[in-house]
Image (cartoon, rainbow, N blue to C red):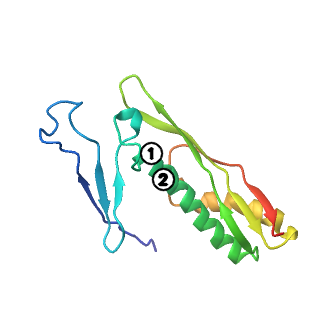
Amino acid sequence: MDKKHQYNLTLKWTGNKGSGTSSYAVYERSHTITIENKPDILCSSDPAFRGDKTKYNPEELFVASISSCHMLWYLHLCADNGVVVTGYEDNPVGTLLELPDGSGHFTDVTLYPSVIVKDKSMYEKANELHKKANELCFIANSCNFKINHKPECKAEE
């Protein structure tokens, strides 16, 4: 039996400087994402598209979603498989291809998870579980391109 989960939020444009979208150059791309009982997320477009570099943009949040979902599945699988992870950090990189008409799409995302495990004997299984995490990740399964992984594994010192 399939289980359905629904996610609700409010996105509000906050960039009207008085004349709305009377021209492309006069409005800000600022907007706020609000989710009940959580801190607001202040957003804009990428600075390449007239956005505010001090705010999160959809492209960054997209790459962060992929990385976060992967990590959560990975930690789950490690716990289920006796791999004791004591540290995890990722520095993902996503590439967006902008087309001549102004549209675009992501061509790839590469995750660079750096994992610390309790013992060297866990390396092989720890590295192997990234593949399974990718297969189970909700966000990766929603993408129309391959998510690459270049993991690094170390043991606690």
Rendered location of residue 100, percent (x, y): 40, 22
State which quarter of the image contains the C terminus.
bottom right
Q: Nearer the viewer, residue 62 or 19?
A: 19
Q: On screen, 70 above or below 85?
A: above
Image position of 110 (left or right of 141)? right
Disc 1, disc 2: CB below 8 Å? Answer: no
Secondary structure beneath label 1: helix
Q: Residue at x 65, y 60 (%)?
A: 89
- Residue 31 is at least partly visible in this image: yes
Rendered location of residue 33, percent (x, y): 32, 59
Q: Residue at x 62, y 57 (%)?
A: 134
The nearer-to-camera label among 1 and 2 is: 1
Q: Residue at x 41, y 50 (%)?
A: 56
Residue, disc 2: 142
Rendered location of residue 69, percent (x, y): 54, 62
Q: Amino acid at mark 2?
A: Ser
- Residue 108's image quarter? top right
- Residue 141 is at least partly visible in this image: no
Q: On screen, 148 above or below 23?
A: below
Secondary structure beneath label 2: helix
Q: What mark, if any, has residue 59 been given in the picture?
A: 1
Q: On screen, 97 above or below 40?
A: above
Which residue is most to the top?
A: 100
Q: Nearer the viewer, residue 1 or 70?
A: 70
Q: Earlier in the sequence, mark 1 or mark 2?
A: 1
Query: Gap in Å between the C-alphas at discs 1 and 2?
Result: 15 Å
Q: Residues within 10 Å of mark 2 (few under 14, many from 20)?
A: few
Image position of 30 (left or right of 98)? left
- Residue 103's image quarter? top left
Image position of 44 (left or right of 112)? left
